[in-house]
Amino acid sequence: MIALSLLVPAATAVWLLGAGRALPHPMVNRVSLAASVLTLAGVLGAVLTRPSIDRSWVPSLGLRWQLAVDGISAPLLLMTALLGVAVVVHTARRPPEGGTSAAFHACLLLVETGALATFYARDAVLFFVAFEIVLVPMWVLITRFGDAHRPEARADAGARFVLYTVLGSTLMLLGILALVTSAGTADLDVLARGDGSGIPEHTQLLIAVALVSGLAVKVPLFPAHTWLPPAHTIAPTAGSVLLAAVLLKMGTYGLVRLPIAVVPDAFAKLAPILAVVGAIGILWGGLACLVERDLKRLVAYSSVAHMGFVALGLASGTQTGMQAALFANVAHGVVSALLFFVVGGLKERWGSADLTAARAALREVSPRLGFALVVGLAASLGLPGLAGFWGEFLGLYAVWSPAAGLPLVVLRGAAVAGALGTVLAAAYALRVARLVWAGERLEPVIADSRGAEWAVVASLVAAALVLGILPQLLLSATADAVAALVGGGA
Amino acid sequence: MTSLVSLDALTLGPVLAVAAGAALVLLLDVVAPRLRGAHFALGAVSLTAGMALAVPGALGSESTPLRTLCLPAPVGACFYEAGPLASALQLGALASALVVLLLVWPAGRAQTPQLRGGPAVLVALVLSATAGAAAVAAAHDLGSWLVALELATLPAIALVALRGTRPAGAGALSLLTTSLVSFAMVVLGAALWLVASGTPVFSSGAVERALRGEDTRAVLLLAVLLLVGGLGFKLSLVPFHAWTPQAYAGGTEPVAAFLAATSKIAALAALVVVLRPLSQVGAPVLVAIGVLAALSMTVGNVLALVQDDPVRLLAWSTVAQAGWVILPLATLSPGGLAASGGYLLAYAVATLVAFTVVTMVSAAAAPLDPQALASPAPPHGRTLAAYRGLLRTRPLLGAALGLALVSLAGLPPGVLGLVAKVVALRPVVGEGMWVLALVAVANAVIGVAVYLRWFAVLLQEPEPTRGPVPRAGRGPVAALTLTGAALVLTSVAPQLLLGLLA
């Protein structure tokens, strides 16, 4: 099952790049759809049956194909596979600009493969390798298939994305190598059981610093977030969705899997810094959203804020915090995917995403898109009953009452800042709703969403509602794994 | 009469086959000067034979290397010792020379006017330099080590000069000058080594004794420094790198490929021979090597970032990659030596693919134009702009070059380069050399910028005003098939390459 869900998209991508280069767009799209649905089936099977693979790959490095599924990775795997289908469906009537359709779909499938492999990986070095797979295809998506009007900005955004991420992942590699050489194994499960015992204390701290700082670039946390707004703004809609919903999760997932699980004591020393950085990110993102003129960039900044909440949850060191972080991860995946689909669609129809230009009110001319936008914004500001609420609420609660031994003042300060951030979120969400959704203007008319686009958007709206009303679905899935990871706690 | 030293021709095979090939090619030229293709075929056969004979050594174990040229019993020292690492480096040197030979293979009736002296001289030079590279990897005493090192260097200078243009002359001259200086340093280092250890054979026992003595220790470390410096010239380490871009850009593309692959393997093999006895006795960390590594990476990468001639870009990338190659040597652990060899071989595979594509693109842009050769300006096709849309116009070439570039950058799908980077960083992190590791991280980032800059050109829309692409010669196509297949295979299963060294 695991092998199926990795090999199908990878092989399809290679085939598209090789033999299928000249195929017409509808054909390519159908092949990719079949591949992504098959991948989804494989992931579903893997999540239900929980198989594992352990096969040697590079013995002289001790590198193994060690893949498995547990409660922490299962929701992320499902989300990745579902969004993998969604982006292909969404592209059905949109032949990509800037290159061949085959290359575009191959890049989407490769990003999906890399993300799935990252979530499956149980070998620390393999985790790093999988982590890197997404880079080149995503770079191609940004620099070749991004905003067609701005070639300079495309090159710049792509370069920023790839260079920042390589910096982060190579730092993470240092941490992984230090961990593997001092612990003598790269098996993440064994490492997690060991809790860092046997590694000298200051080496543990160095490992944690390398891992956290490396992954913080990917998440991204303040001040390493500056690659994110240009990348999200320039990328094509499918690319933005994968970036926000899947790639950012690889960073937070890495934080849970590596430093928190493996060197918990050293991570606890860094937790206050993480909380402060997360709180700054929440405020910074919120403030940027209040003045941002480009709608796509605004959604990107709101991602920075949301990732700040995830960081707060992780920093608390409690089971609740961890659960909140994992929940916020998935919720942000759903909500940001929804928002990027809607905003990307609007940008296509408007020709730009400038908020200062006069537009027809969405609620008048395209009620479906308008509704989806409002749901997305409401979920994004953390309205109860929608997906965004539980992650933020539980995260703030957890960081207000953190695990014993953490500096209470710092964490509570971060909690207050985070709460302020939710106010900012409400302010910018209402700003966007007022500018784009409300009003009486009927000119210029834009087409409403229908067909494949509406199917994708509507199912994401439904997912945001389901996660908001029945959070237990997700919380219970991660509970056991989190309990095993944190052990005790609140 | 018993001979002074024992001789096992099969063990010496990787060197003997290639050296004999060089002699036979010259002989053939005397006997039948009109047979032009035969020289290349003879060269290819001797290189293949040498590779086959190097395989047993590569499959052996480090503790029981293949030995020959041994002195009689009471002394028992051997002048030729090929363990897995040495044999793997021999294999790499021979295979890359074979690729170079394929690149200069004459295309049908048309002769290659780019090199003077005719095919015999060209093939003989390539083969003798390769024989030197194979010999230096397994040399186990100062005398044969020095001779082999020079044998690996001097023909390469002639190869650069053979093109006969003014830039080629300048490149050859600068290569010659630096080689002389480096030879002087190496000889001085060898003399000091002899003084310190008291034996001309590289043995860990003698080194251990020398390190214990107060006076001899200082002399030995000075000797190592001089040897590292002298070899630094050949490896293009900063600050001994200045000849590299001149010689690469001056010579033809296949010669640059030879300098980038075979010559670099020879230089590292020579360095490994010197450092192995030191690593076996657990000598202290060599800060000097770490500094050279950090400088080379940084200078090489930063200057590669602003090049517009692909050959010069690859030249500066060699400088940067040489830094990565010696990075694990800074720890002087036995694992460090193998890691360094592994990184170099991975680099050689990727860079040979890149040079093969560069050769083919340049040949297509300026098909054997004698006018262009005479002018001092860089030939047409030697700018990054010539690669616009290569993935569209010539998909196979573009894909091969793209894979080589991401491999050099250390990003998937060039998994080989990524794994090589892990291999090179592991000993450094394991020994806790965090400053060096952070410099390496910064350079990993700049390196990605260097190679993706070129990769982005491949992805662009092709220029519409292109005529039909001239057919590539059979030799370069064979070279591309060989190196491309090697790169793809080792990316899927890096163990194929790294397993040679363990």
Image (cartoon, rainbow, N blue to C red):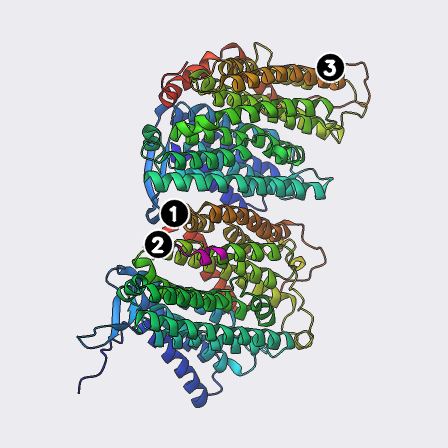
- Look at the numbered disc 2 and give the secondary structure of its residue: loop
In this rendering, position of residue B218 left or right of residue B244? left
Q: Position of residue B97 (x, y in %)?
A: 44, 69
- Look at the numbered disc 1 and give the secondary structure of its residue: loop
The kind of residue on which mark 1 rests is: Glu
Which residues make up the magenta segment?
A: B283-291
Q: Which residue is mark 1?
A: B431
Residue B365, quarter of picture: bottom right
- The residue that appears at 34% across and 73% down in the rendered structure is B194
The kind of residue on which mark 3 rests is: Arg
Does A143 sit above or below residue B481?
Answer: above
Q: Position of residue B115 (x, y in %)?
A: 56, 78
Q: Which residue is mark 3?
A: A363
**Are the two marked residues, 1 and 2, in contact with CB atoms closer than 8 angstroms?**
yes
The residue most toward the bottom is: B31
- Say few, some or many: other residues with alpha carbon within 10 Å of mark 1 (under 14 / 14 to 19 / 20 or more): some
- Find the distance from the CA under tag 2 to the CA under tag 3: 69 Å
- Look at the numbered disc 3 and give the secondary structure of its residue: helix
Q: Chain of mark 3?
A: A
- B284 magenta-colored: yes
- B102 magenta-colored: no
- Find the distance from the CA under tag 1 to the CA under tag 2: 9 Å
Q: Chain of mark 2?
A: B
Give the mark nearer the N terminus: 1 vs 2. Answer: 2
- Find the distance from the CA under tag 3 to the CA under tag 1: 63 Å
Does A426 sit above or below residue B72?
Answer: above
Q: Which residue is mark 2?
A: B333
Q: How many marks?
A: 3
**Are the two marked residues, 2 and 3, in contact with CB atoms closer than 8 angstroms?**
no
